[in-house]
Amino acid sequence: MSRDMSYDAVMSRKNEIMKKAIGIDYDVFETGGIGFDYERMMREAGYSLEEIQKIQSSTGVGNTPILELKNLTALARKLAPKGKGARIFIKDEATNPSGSFKARRASVSVYHAKKLGYKGVIAATSGNYGAAVASQAAMAGLKCIVVQECYDSKMVGQPEILEKQRACEAYGAEVVQLSVGPELFYSFLCLLEETGYFNASLYTPFGIAGVETLGYELIMQFREKLGRDPDKVVITHAGGGNVTGTARGIKKAGAEHTEIVGASVDLSGLHMASDRDFNRKSFTTGHTGFGIPFATWPDRADVPRNAARPLRYLDRYLTVKQGEVFYITEALSVLEGLERGPAGNTSLTAAFALAQEMDEDQIIVVQETEYTGAGKHPMPQISFAKQNGIEILFGDPDTEVPGQNIVFPDHPSKIKVRDFDLGKARMSYIKNAINNYGKKEISQYDFEFLVKDTNSDENFVRSVLSELDVKVL
Amino acid sequence: MDTIKKGDWVQIHKIVLKPEERASHLPEDTKKVPLEMWVKGFALSDGKIGEEIEIKTVTGRIVKGTAIKLNPRYIHDFGDYVPELAKIDMQLKEMLFGGDCDE
Ligand SMILES: Cc1ncc(COP(=O)(O)O)c(C=O)c1O
């Protein structure tokens, strides 16, 4: 019997395929409406912190060093008002086996897949997560397929994604490359059905729990080194797992007063599903093209319920410009002697500006770095941008227009703190929830869920709902 | 060099969805082009670049498509030299360590 493999037929089998490929019955956490029992899902479908520490230490993941960036701090203090300029630290996640914090997520997914008896794992990702899953699968002796959106319709590949392909293949994985478009999900479902492999989604409870050790470790390291908790932790944000997992770990360590700050590269104006725009961006993750949609509607992910729910944890969300991140990447290299890849430098850029608003005795931490190399370095990215007709300028980064130019700050004082209004994000989350579920009235349970999922309060949710003409029963 | 021997490492290309089969609500430019796929594996027969061939991938999947490259090279690199970056480096060092770092 041959199955109908048309787009509509495969998409209509989505739930059935997913159930087999993840081994989680999400229905038990559902209540039939907008809300679901998030903490119960994290508890029952995930792993405890202790279990994860054990899994990760057996694969060489985690326990990454904390480094103080003394020269970058000194530069920030030169630009800051007298008495301002917090000490800047980074957690060197590039020292994980596959070169980024994504090894934490992958280690737990692959462990879980092996425990459940799957022969292989599949991940849909163009980023570091592919290399992380491939590396962990190699250690576990599982087969691995990585599905990536890589080329535009002229078969021109983003250099950073081409490097990810190479890394995945180096770890022994099969890489399936696709042109631009959201139907990657269709190809992904076809592969899950064909192989019966495990869906090593970025968004499962165990994947997110894998990042909790990062936040927990970080706090313990500061208590040991400096005898206190950091004031702010800055986290590069895209799909939301980095923010969610790190923040949960920080809270599990009992650091109630450490502020959680998200940061993304501003790519406003570029359409993520556009064949033309695809190669006009110089960052493939940690940007607003993922950061905002995932914050305002997490359940768009490749699992029924996303364990990454960043709005629950963000105290602030900052945006930075492409030109600023390249500038700070150079600074990290020539002032600190650390050559590190693009995504971690997004939060470093935000931290550099934010440190200047903080007192000298305060501490700000950038919670990750990632590996760098061919394709994922400022030089190939800027060359690629030039080939694509992007203008490279020096000036005020506020004049940068994504897809048209990259503006390097002509002076580091031009690197600024820009807050994305979280109130607006919370409002659009509530609108998305109401629209996606097509509700005119919601239960008290759903109401309370919306308060928690947006980390706001009853009055705020009530006012947004009344604007939408939605009643609470 | 466009002949392929059985067992050679080749990259194949295929169309997954024709423009008219693609999802609705795509941007106009994406709607006009097909969804394409590329994958690599060992040729299951002799063949030629530009012709249809079957491959076995490293996970053991059998996939059919047009052979486009034999032993495909990784083409990404460090790009052209970007003089703007050197300007940034010199500015940073000058600001922090003083004016004689370029001597
Ligand atoms: C190195 C690195 N940092 C940060 C991120 C963002 O993480 P998340 O997608 O969980 O928000 C990614 C992944 O996209 C990444 O690879």
Image (spheres, coloured by chain):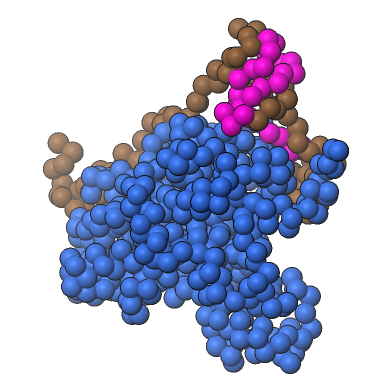
Chain colours: A blue, B brown
Whether residue A292 appears in this view of the structure is no
B85 sits left or right of A187 in the view = left
Q: Residue at x 61, y 86 (%)?
A: A448
Between A77 and A234, the residue placed more toward the observer is A234
Q: Position of residue A290 (x, y in %)?
A: 57, 57
In the picture, the quarter occupied by the N terminus of chain A is top right
Residue A172 vs A112, above or below: the answer is above
Q: Residue at x 68, y 69 (%)?
A: A27
Between A267 and A404, the residue placed more toward the observer is A267
Between A121 and B40, the residue placed more toward the observer is A121
Between A129 and A157, the residue placed more toward the observer is A129
In the picture, the quarter occupied by the C terminus of chain A is bottom right
Q: Position of residue A43 (x, y in %)?
A: 50, 71
Q: Which residues are magenta?
A: B33-60
Q: Position of residue A342 (x, y in %)?
A: 41, 48
Assess whether residue B75 is covered by the magenta stretch. Answer: no
Q: Residue at x 18, y 73 (%)?
A: A227
Whether residue A346 appears in this view of the structure is yes
Assess whether residue B46 is covered by the magenta stretch. Answer: yes
Q: Position of residue A467 (x, y in %)?
A: 71, 86
